[in-house]
Image (cartoon, helix red, strand yellow):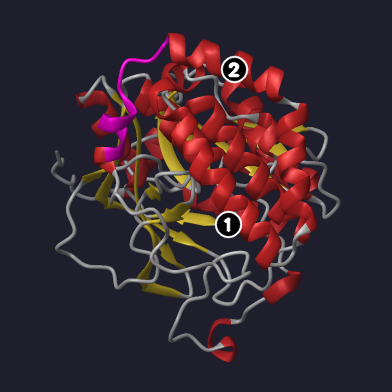
């Protein structure tokens, strides 16, 4: 379902919106040493059309002056509608959880610090959730800021035994694209129903980095909520075209989180089969492809934490409203992503040249 886009509001109407109380949306921005990105995101959120928002910046112990910048924004622009929370550097999953638990509005927008929304993004996203009570999360096109005609993600897909990837990654942005159901949405820009996220157990804070949005989307689906992307929702993502090699620590978290997700979320009838296939893949991958040590460490971590994982599994499965077979109808049915990561932190954008997009390369911090 789509909604008709409203006419642009005159400037005096925008000013009136910004003087009014927030309208039921809290934006949660996790960050780590990205002061300039956060400042740009705040400027973008201030001029969103037709709606006022509250913002919570959750800082994973930045050392680049983020706190001072936010304090200046509070004093000069946002006032009490902008809050700053500083926490230990435990990753974006725990930062988002702190934000969603501090929020009191019915809707929460998970918004990465390196994202810029189209001017009516929030207004349209609210309309979708207002109209459909079972819509738990909505997102749209994430496009590359260095090449906005190219898609970074249009929601996410999930392979049969846990490999996950962004839909339409690297493809041209097309006006013919329609709304679509997804198993999960990239939480770079995702509006959620707060009660749905809390009912699903929020993000798994043990993940630190990677798969936290895949895991949450799957659990929302299990509870019977829809997860959908809409083409009218467009956000620019300031990422590198050539992101560099994956650090071994990130490999550890990817593998650890993927297995934990399968153990927690898989329906009983398919759990043993899925685990058999996954473990076979993991062993082959751990033997043939470097870095090997973090992959084996991820397996041992899950063995050590199996009691905790099993407790989370029992709680989730007792709430199940939808079968995994139904969940998987929202995906492509593939086992593997269309394009391998090939040791990269993210897939490089084919056709781009480093000199034309100002890459940061392997030195860039992409944790939030």
* Relative side of 85 to 172, left or right: right
Whether residue 84 is visible here, answered yes or no, is no
Pick the front one: 239 or 11? 239
Q: Residue at x 62, y 64 (%)?
A: 345
Kindly identify which numbered label has been placed on residue 312. Answer: 2
Q: Residue at x 41, y 35 (%)?
A: 191
Q: How far apart are the alpha carbons under marks 2 and 1?
A: 32 Å
Q: Badge 2: few (under 14), some or many (20 or more) residues near its Cα, within 10 Å?
A: some
Name the residue beneath numbered marker 1: 114
Q: Secondary structure at mark 1?
A: loop
Whether residue 150 is visible here, answered yes or no, is yes
Q: Residue at x 43, y 69 (%)?
A: 339
The quarter of the rendered structure image containing the N terminus is top left
- 275 inside magenta stretch: no
- With respect to residue 10, does 274 lie above or below? above
Pick the front one: 64 or 273? 273
The x, y position of residue 111, in whole percent, is 52, 44
Pick the front one: 324 or 150? 324
Pick the front one: 284 or 118? 284
């Amino acid at each position: 379902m789509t909604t008709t886009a409203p006419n642009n509001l005159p400037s005096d109407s925008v000013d009136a919106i910004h003087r009014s109380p927030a309208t039921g949306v809290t934006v949660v921005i996790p960050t780590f040493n990205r002061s300039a990105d956060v400042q740009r995101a705040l400027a973008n959120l201030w001029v969103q059309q037709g709606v006022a928002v509250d913002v919570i910046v959750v800082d994973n112990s930045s050392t680049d002056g983020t706190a001072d910048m936010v304090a200046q924004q509070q004093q000069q622009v946002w006032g009490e509608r902008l809050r700053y929370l500083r926490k230990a550097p435990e990753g974006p999953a725990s930062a988002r959880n702190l934000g969603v638990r501090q929020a009191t509005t019915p809707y929460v927008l998970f918004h990465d610090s390196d994202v810029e929304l189209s001017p009516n993004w929030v207004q349209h996203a609210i309309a979708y959730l207002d109209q459909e009570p079972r819509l738990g999360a909505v997102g749209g096109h994430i496009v590359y800021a260095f090449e906005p005609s190219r898609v970074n993600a249009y929601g996410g897909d999930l392979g049969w035994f846990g490999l996950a990837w962004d839909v339409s990654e690297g493809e041209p942005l097309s006006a013919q694209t329609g709304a679509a159901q997804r198993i999960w949405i990239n939480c770079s820009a995702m509006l959620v129903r707060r009660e749905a996220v809390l009912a699903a157990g929020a993000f798994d804070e043990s993940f630190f980095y990677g798969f936290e949005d895949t895991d949450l989307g799957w659990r929302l689906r299990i509870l019977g909520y829809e997860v959908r992307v809409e083409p009218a929702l467009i956000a620019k993502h300031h990422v590198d075209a050539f992101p560099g090699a994956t650090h071994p620590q990130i490999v550890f978290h990817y593998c650890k989180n993927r297995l934990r997700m399968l153990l927690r979320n898989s329906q009983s009838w398919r759990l043993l089969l899925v685990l058999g296939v996954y473990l076979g893949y993991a062993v082959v991958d751990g033997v043939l492809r470097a870095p090997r040590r973090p992959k084996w460490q991820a397996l041992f971590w899950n063995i050590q934490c199996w009691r905790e994982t099993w407790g989370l599994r029992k709680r989730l499965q007792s709430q199940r409203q939808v079968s995994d077979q139904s969940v998987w109808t929202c995906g492509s049915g593939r086992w593997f992503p269309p394009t391998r990561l090939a040791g990269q932190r993210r897939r490089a954008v084919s056709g781009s040249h480093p000199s034309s997009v100002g890459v940061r390369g392997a030195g860039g911090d992409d944790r939030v």
